[in-house]
Amino acid sequence: MSEKWLSVIGIGEDGLEGLTPPARALVDNAEILIGGVRHLDMVPDDGRERRAWPSPIRTLIPEIEGLRGRRVCVLATGDPMHFGVGTTLLRGIPVDEVTIIPGRSAFTMATARLGWTRHEVDCLTLHGRPLELLQAYLQPGARLLVLTDDGNTAAKVSALLSRRGYGASKITVLERMDAAEENRVFGTAESWDTPQTDDFNTVAIECLSGPGAQLLSRTPGLPDDAFASDGQLTKREVRAVTLSALAPAPGDLLWDIGAGCGSIAIEWMRQHPRNAAIAIEHNPSRVQMIATNAAALGTPLLRTVTGDAADSLNDLPQPDAVFVGGGIGTPGLLEQCWTALAPGGRLVANVVTTEGERVLFEWRENRGGELRRLFIERAEQVGRLTGWRPAMTVTQYFGCKS
């Protein structure tokens, strides 16, 4: 087993006095202290080397790795492994070289103060991340705890909630929890009048929807009008079946080829916060549309690639699933996707033309898999009467790589 030379200590507003004896010993015995300015100020200056976090934090990681063999202590807020620096450090440093002692997390302290049951609360961070991530969590009755960037976040959150029809939502800003200056600010999103709170805060939200709120489930098959589109949109019913075939699991990566307005990739990412997707689309105006839809539906971290599929796939990370919604006639495309898939990966392709069907039939003859046809009809007004209007029949291929 490797020698543990690096310690990561969660510290609260009560500073060194709040640490357990083992955590305090690691801080006291360290040769080098690393942390935010606020953390370092909690430790009396005794001449030891100190290094403050740069922005972004990850730029310091190679430097920390170069200190292997010395006693290094990283100070972090609360629980370093919950949206914290510990996760970042362990991407490059083996865990058997690290001692991690968490402090009281903001989420734990907030639920205790509010009387909320922890497992019934959604926890997320907007620290260094797009505000639009919040939109994927908006549901009537939802309780959210949000780590913030600074004292402006609560006002931005209130404005977003109001725009989405959640203006009645109750907001509590918990400032400097566990400090002598601990304070709370209360209000509703629509009446929020505190543009600046303390920078060190956690925002609690009780989501209450109004008459104008668009209620968007995480279940696949969002309404078609939830997406901005030029017509290149996988329709709601077909989208639900397609997501079922793609079978997203937490942490999976999807390639969405011929992404159109991005509906498949967006709904894939909405299934779980750790899901990721890459939307490949050759039309620049549709790429912009994908970004607009992703922000509006809570998946602003959706990655887009502009270009033809055959030229865009080589340098992408290995996918767990691939959806081909366009470009099916590109020579070698299905083979390229199949080769790239991880074991157990799923390949799904939808076509509406006989030429596309021919490609899928030939592929199935060689590789196996399943073919199905999807017939959708919607009731529409025909003069003063109502009739059934059929959509184009969709032929769908599904294959799972052994």
Image: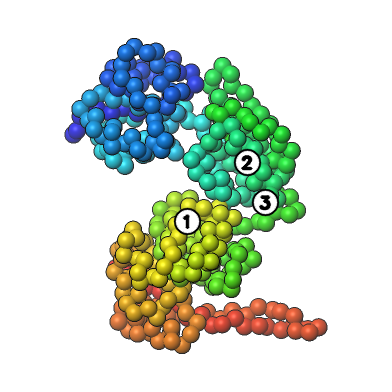
Distance between the Cα atoms at labels 1 and 3?
A: 21 Å
Q: Is residue 290 above or below residue 12?
A: below
User: Callout 3, which amino acid?
Assistant: Arg
Distance between the Cα atoms at labels 2 and 3?
A: 13 Å
Residue shown at 37% from the left, 78% from the top? 330
Nearest to viewer (mark 2 / mark 3): 2
Q: Position of residue 36 (x, y in %)?
A: 42, 27
Nearest to N terminus: mark 1 or mark 3 = 3
Residue shown at 64% from the left, 38% from the top? 155
User: Callout 1, which amino acid?
Assistant: Leu
Query: Does residue 75 appear in this view?
Result: yes
Q: Position of residue 237 (x, y in %)?
A: 57, 71
The residue where tag 2 is placed is 156
What is the residue that sits farthest to the left in this orientation? 1
Q: Position of residue 46 (x, y in %)?
A: 34, 11
State if disc 3 and disc 2 touch (CB < 8 Å): no
- Name which quarter of the figure residue 316 lies in: bottom left
Q: Secondary structure at mark 2?
A: helix
In the drawing, what numbered circle is on residue 165?
none
The residue where tag 1 is placed is 302
Q: Secondary structure at mark 1?
A: loop
Residue shown at 44% from the left, 51% from the top? 274
Query: Does residue 112 appear in this view?
Result: no
Crowdedness of circle 3 by 10 Å Cα count: few (<14), some, many (20+)?
some
Distance between the Cα atoms at labels 2 and 1?
A: 21 Å
State if disc 1 and disc 2 touch (CB < 8 Å): no
Q: Nearer the viewer, residue 204 or 142?
A: 204
Q: Position of residue 164 (x, y in %)?
A: 67, 51
Q: Quadrant of the C terminus?
A: bottom left
Nearest to N terminus: mark 2 or mark 1 = 2
The residue where tag 3 is placed is 164
Q: Nearer the viewer, residue 17 or 226?
A: 226
